[in-house]
Amino acid sequence: MSDVMHNFELYQPDSVQGAADLLGEFEDAWIIAGAKDSLGWFKDRVKQPSVVVDIGGIAELSGIEETEDGGLYIGATTTLTDVVENPLVSERFPVLSLSASKVASPQIRNAGTIGGNISQDTRCVYYRSGFPCYRAEGNTCYANTPTAMNRDHALFEVSRCVAVTPSDTAPAMVALDASMVIRRKGEDIEVPASEYFIGPEIDITRMTALEHGDILLGIRIPGTWASARHYFEKAADRNTWDFALVSITMVAKMAGNAIEDAAMVCGGVQCTPRRLTEVEDVIRGEVPGPEVETLVRRVASRGAQPLNFNHFKIPLMESLAARAVRSLT
Ligand SMILES: Cc1cc2nc3c(=O)[nH]c(=O)nc-3n(C[C@H](O)[C@H](O)[C@H](O)COP(=O)(O)OP(=O)(O)OC[C@H]3O[C@@H](n4cnc5c(N)ncnc54)[C@H](O)[C@@H]3O)c2cc1C
């Protein structure tokens, strides 16, 4: 049950360097930006860092700029509302504004940041409730038992942990070939989205490539898919305030009536956004229509290994992929 938060020391640096110094000084320092994921952990008293570094007030981390290649650079602490309302984002990369607009509620989008959204932790009910599972450095998975509540969990790439990515905007980052700019030990490095999101086989205790002390500075989206055809759809139990059961993100370029190229990514089905490369191969060069949709349904969920209560995600995933392709007709 949610409770009063534990005591911690709160620091509010006004520069990236100041934040980096604090993270270097305190071993268990925890970054908050909008804090909409973090405060849940604290109120449940499952995570109790003694030092919290609030980077929400660092001006240099916020804002959206055009880049020379027709893309955008989005500061990590830019709020989801600012991403949704920014005309450059909605003109060039509507799939990002659409997916950001489906996160939680207006209040959460007003405070929650794009960097926090793609770096948030999983929502597995057992892990979030403090069960000592593999992800929490214990020795079992409570969600992968015959009677476990696992309708929200993974269909693919399970490696001890069956938790899924909860982020609505993470699939857009993969589809758009974005890269994450990270300050690590005084240097700025760029990590492609395809490597930013990590599965349990790489590190079961983390969802992203961020290591302790790292600060996500911003997200670079190249112009590659600017103003192409974009599609986003999220299926959830409720229309608002709810995480995706499955989501689909697609960007596509047309040559006349045919699909010249496409990237399709599914959320909610594995620990990382799942790129549907088989679907992309099937639709490339084809004129979208009922026959192509049938093929898409056949390959979209190939390799899925459902748990006891998440079989429904398979037809859902297939339908969402087919609907994305139908949007191109
Ligand atoms: C009721 C409710 C409903 C929600 N529904 C949805 C939903 O439908 N879809 C969805 O996608 N999300 C949802 N969320 C999750 C989350 O609140 C939002 O995604 C929000 O965008 C998180 O951003 P934040 O800045 O508030 O995160 P924070 O809590 O500040 O940060 C999240 C994590 O990222 C790390 N972090 C943040 N910024 C940086 C940075 N710059 N550098 C390094 N590390 C960083 C933090 O240390 C923390 O671990 C929901 C949350 C709640 C409480």
Image: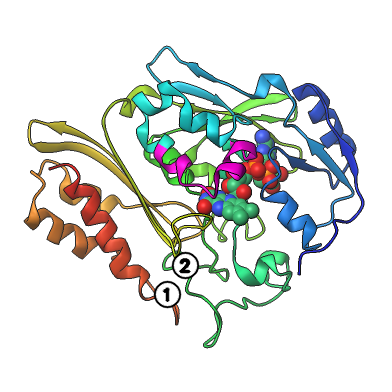
> Which quadrant of the structure image shows residue 121?
bottom right
Dominant SS of magenta comes to helix
Q: Is residue 215 visible?
A: yes
Which residue lies at the image location 72% right of the left edge and 73% below the top edge? 131
Judge: label 2 CB < 8 Å from ligand 1: no
Seen from the viewer's position, the closer of residues 320 and 183 is: 320
**Residue 175, image x, y percentages:** 37, 40
Element on which disc 1 rests? loop
Residue 82 to residue 156: above or below: above
Report if residue 102 lies within the magenta region.
yes
Judge: label 1 CB < 8 Å from ligand 1: no
Element on which disc 2 rests? loop
**Residue 296, image x, y percentages:** 19, 57
Q: Is residue 209 visible?
A: no
Residue 81 to residue 278: above or below: above
The amino acid on which the numbered mark 2 sits, given as a three-letter code, is Ala
> Which quadrant of the structure image shows residue 48?
bottom right
Query: How far apart are the alpha carbons under marks 1 and 2?
Result: 8 Å
Q: Which residues are magenta?
A: 98-113
Identify the residue under disc 2. Answer: 154
The amino acid on which the numbered mark 1 sits, given as a three-letter code, is Asn
Identify the residue under disc 1. Answer: 310
